[in-house]
Amino acid sequence: MKRFSRLSLVLIVLMSVAFLGACASGSSSGPGTGGEGAYCPAPAGQAVMDYITKENPYQNWDLWPGKGKLYKGQHPHGSYLTTYVSPLAHGAIEDKAGEIPDTAFIVKENYTSRKVLAAVTVMYKKTGYNAAAGDWFWLKYTPDGKIEAEGKVAGCIGCHIAVKSNDWLFTGPTK
């Protein structure tokens, strides 16, 4: 009976971690199983793009709390925006945790004034990646999957440094 209870407890903990949307701690590659708890992609453009489009499609995540689809945007992101947040990011935003946790994602669809998707921009929090810029990995790709910018993108960092005290985020308070 004790063995069954311990096994049950382990399964509950594992299911809870997967439900909360955490990537497996310390893992940086490997085939996913479709849930955000499957693994953490390496901070590299193609790995991140594959993860959020194939392994754990960002369109299945919640929208940024308090924001709907196609809200008014501004340069450089576009006239209209739709921002999705991974479960980890969503929880931190809702709880006003003060910062987005390691392995969380923010994915912004950038639309033209005619509401045509022009690009997708991604912020991926990866502890140890770039402490000088909040440990954010930045990615921009076109609707057809062409990567236009990735990594420690000077333009992203140069703009978002203005909100460094808000974990490098313009949209909504984290505290």
Image (spheres, helix red, strand yellow):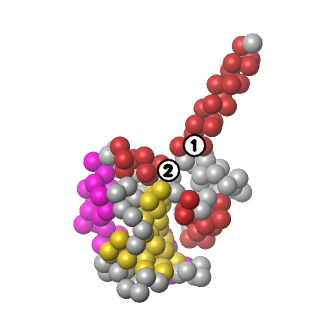
| Quadrant housing residue 31 | bottom right
Numbered-mark total: 2
User: Is residue 160 visible in this depiction of the protein?
Assistant: yes
Is 162 within the magenta? Answer: yes
Mark number for residue 87? 2
The label on residue 19 is 1
At x 52% / y 78%, what residue is drawn? Answer: 141
Q: Mark 1: which amino acid?
A: Phe
Q: Extreme bottom residue here? A: 114
**Where in the figure is residue 61, as x and y percent of width and height?**
52, 57
Callout 1: 10 Å neighbours few (<14), some, many (20+)?
A: some
Question: Relative to residue 165, is residue 139 depicted above or below?
Answer: below
How many angstroms separate mark 1 from mark 2 (CA)?
8 Å
Q: Which mark is residue 174?
A: none
Tell me the quadrant of the picture where the N terminus can be found: top right
Residue 160 versus residue 144: which sits nearer the camera? Answer: 144
Residue 84 locus on image (x, y percent): 46, 62
